[in-house]
Image: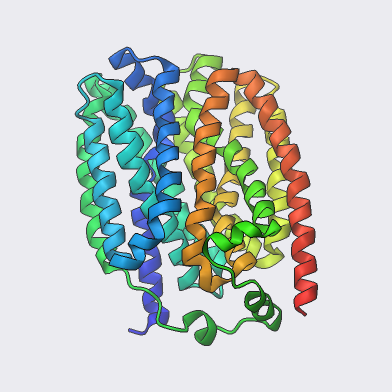
Amino acid sequence: MGFERRRWIYLFSGMLIELCAGLPYSWSVFQNLLAEKYQWSTAGTAGAYSFSSICMIAFSLLAATPLMNRIGLSRFLALGGLIYAAGTVGCGLIQGSLAELYLYYGVCIGVGTAILYPTLTSYAVRLFPDRPGLASGVMVGGYGCGPFVIAPLLAKVHGITGDISKAFLPLGALFAIVILPLSLLLREPPEGWGNGVHDQGENEQAQNSKTGIAGKEILRHGLFYLVYVTFALAITNGTMLVTQASPILRDRFHISVAASANIVGGISISNTVGRLLWGGISDRIGLGRSTVMIHVAMLVGFGLLLVGDLWLSIGAMLLCVFCFGGASTLLAPCTAQAFGPDQLKQNYPIMFSVFGLAGILGPVVCTNLGHGSAFLAGTAAAAGGVAVSVMYHKVKVRMDTEAC
């Protein structure tokens, strides 16, 4: 079987790994349950998610690329799977100290996610240089779909046993069983795959040759900051809703844990569909236009959240998370387009730090400002996102014109 066909096997294998890595998107389901069980403060418990994001940023910037280059793709992913699964099991063995949550969830799951998510996302774009949006959407769609499986399972175990910790032990074992063999299955594309196997337009080739910038060199270019801020605003808004959806709904509308878990499952579906559809849309209308549309839709969604109606709030969350899924999908293709596809393996871990930044800001804004003020902040961020994404689109169009 040639690589042309095998790449589809690799893509969907990676998607299954990403699905297992989707535990952080179920955080809103078990955050309050852990706090209630161990008598932790809400802010202290939520801080574990932010600490996880700090660990993600640190590992992505300092260690990810050198370590992957040293041990190779498959072993790197297997290592990430082991760390991630160990952290999940550890969450079920906590004896009562908040420091344990910061160790198992913050460090282990944070580092494991920093290995699995960005590595597989950039891998998908390298597998499909002819359809980067679609490939990235399928890969990260698995991550977004994780809560659809994980959140109801967590709520079910809690409903039966009354102890959320008992759900983490089998989950950790399952993650290891799935991630390890699939990681060892994956193979890098053959040399010259993006240039020789699939034709690129003259415009794209010219742009790639002009912007072949790797590693910390991208920090010297203004385009990096336009791309980074564009996605930081969208991903922070989305992370705020993904991580705090259950507490928001339970506190504002007094719904049950089971009902909020079902809504979180629906949000995960919207997230996944957004990752898939926006990837295909961007391949058709372009990355610049797609990013502008994402921010405009988020602006509408956060405006609706200010109204305060249950069903309107659910619909607004679904819309915003749909767009968040799109932003998560387009980050890797935009990075490849801006700085060259051949440099994506080095550049995407730097860009991936935007998820860590969002993981710090999103929960902190929501838990410390209160829901109403957080929604106002989200509306302002979305409005700023519209302006910055328009600037990014104009710069992209000018670059394309110059490349011609």
Q: Position of residue 28 (x, y in %)?
A: 44, 29
Q: Position of residue 328 (x, y in %)?
A: 55, 50
Examine the rendered structure and indicate whether residue 87 appears above or below residue 282: above
**Which residue is depicted at the point 64% across and 71% down?**
211
Q: In the figure, residue 179 lies in which quadrant?
A: bottom left
On screen, residue 288 versus residue 127, left or right, reads right
Q: Position of residue 314 (x, y in %)?
A: 58, 29
The quadrant of the rendering that contains the C terminus is bottom right
- Taking depth in this image into account, of 182 and 250 the one nearest to the observer is 182
The quadrant of the rendering that contains the N terminus is bottom left
Identify the image's colour scheme: rainbow, by chain, secondary structure or one colour. Answer: rainbow
Examine the rendered structure and indicate whether residue 349 appears above or below residue 10: above
On screen, residue 270 versus residue 154, left or right, reads right
Instruction: Tell me if residue 141 can be seen.
Output: yes
On screen, residue 315 versus residue 192, left or right, reads right
**Which residue is depicted at the point 20% across and 35% down?**
169
- Taking depth in this image into account, of 347 and 164 the one nearest to the observer is 347
**Which residue is depicted at the point 22% across and 50% down?**
176
